Amino acid sequence: MNEWHLTLNRNGGCVKRLLLHGLAEERAESIMSFNWKRLLGCSQDDVLGLDIGSSSVRMIQLAKNGDGYTVVAAHVCDIKQDNADVAAREESIVQAVQKCTALARKNARWAVCSVSGPEVAVRPFKFPPLQTEELDGAVRLEASQVCPFNVDEGVVDYQIIPSGESNNAAAGVLVAASNDVIQRKIRIVEKANMSCVMMDVNGLALLNCLIAGKNADINISTSAVLDIGTSCATLAVIGENGLPFVRTVPYAGNDIVAQIAKENNVSSKIVEDELYDSASSKIAPENLQASMEKASIKLVSDIAETLRYHSTQAKSMPVDKLLVCGTFGMVKGFVDILNKQLPIKVVLWNPFDTMKCSVDRQCLEVIQSKGPAMVVAAGLAMRSV
């Protein structure tokens, strides 16, 4: 199975790199301008998966043992939401990153991060046979047609996937992200005294975790992952042809909270307390559930429409199981709403259920209670560096 990612060079810029999962080490070195393991002297458990979201920072550190992983360290830190000033808010994010990374083992200084949202796009492509020197231009042109931002002010990466066709058509997947969203993550990590050795995409990190998890109860070809955050949701599926299908859904947790608050004539803060704090009881449980069901209609519609579109694509099997994760995905009763309104099975997914954990009690408590919110971080920690 393939890995797709954006890789950072030593100067903090982004360049196109190809790295196949399971590729022989000597071959991997031959296609990279430098090798991070050799350059930094780091191993898998020296590198953190760092998921910097809009409401919290999630950190996972893994050690690879044979075919599986052991969780070495894990932490979640909320980001202060009372800072209207941009600089002050960024400082709050930096502080959250520092609190997370302080709990890592071996004083790890390297992180794999990711980007998501409307300024990021993942799309498959297929061209007639092209010369190698023509491919870059063709991919960039394709990106300019599908990206909602100016690709001249961003990074375009791609990976060719053998199509098995006799006409030598060039097929693969492209990833594009704006410079602003990439550089913002780099700046935050550097301010926290860490180095970002690789920049990934949330949707691909989700799929990487799904593939590497090797859960016998999950059919990868017919399962989709839905990560529901506070500011956006990400839907990711692996097609039968091995190509990733990733879409960002802009309607997510904050929008649902706002709708519930409006219907019950209360503040969003009160609704958040009700949803995330089981001790709060300012809204009657039956009213809260009814309001959440009503506020989720648009998200359910967006998910259903996206899954229908995926099913129409060539070599795509219908999805029959939706693995829900993310901060808002853990809200009590929310998965039940999706199960009720979608025609497929919906389950809350905690990939750490099939992983070993170190003897650290704090680490174990985090992955047991917050595991579904840490899938992206886990997928990032699994990346080859």
Image: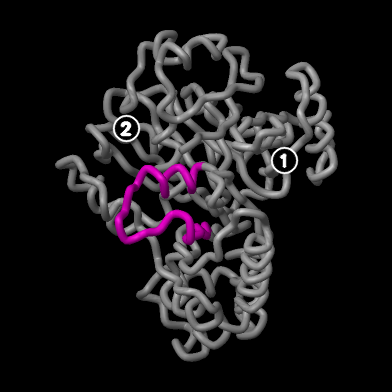
Report which residue position mark 1 lands on. Answer: 125
Q: Residues within 10 Å of mark 1 (few under 14, many from 20)?
A: some
Report which residue position mark 2 lands on. Answer: 104
Quarter of the C terminus within the rendering: top left
User: Which range of residues does the magenta coloring cover?
Assistant: 205-227
| Three-letter residue code for mark 2 | Ala
Q: Hey, which quadrant is residue 136 in on the image?
A: top right
In the image, farthest residue toward the front: 166
Q: How is the image coloured?
A: one colour
Taking the image as shown, residue 83 lies to the left or right of residue 37, namely right
Q: Nearer the viewer, mark 2 or mark 1?
A: 1
Magenta span contains residue 210: yes
| Three-letter residue code for mark 1 | Phe
Taking the image as shown, residue 229 lies to the left or right of residue 298, namely left
Q: Residue at x 65, y 84 (%)?
A: 263
Q: Sequence-wise, which precedes: disc 2 or disc 1?
A: 2
In the rendered image, residue 78, in percent from the top left (x then y), is placed at 46, 50
Q: Residues within 10 Å of mark 2 (few under 14, many from 20)?
A: many
Q: Is residue 130 above or below residue 335?
A: above
Magenta span contains residue 94: no
Observer able to see residue 271:
yes
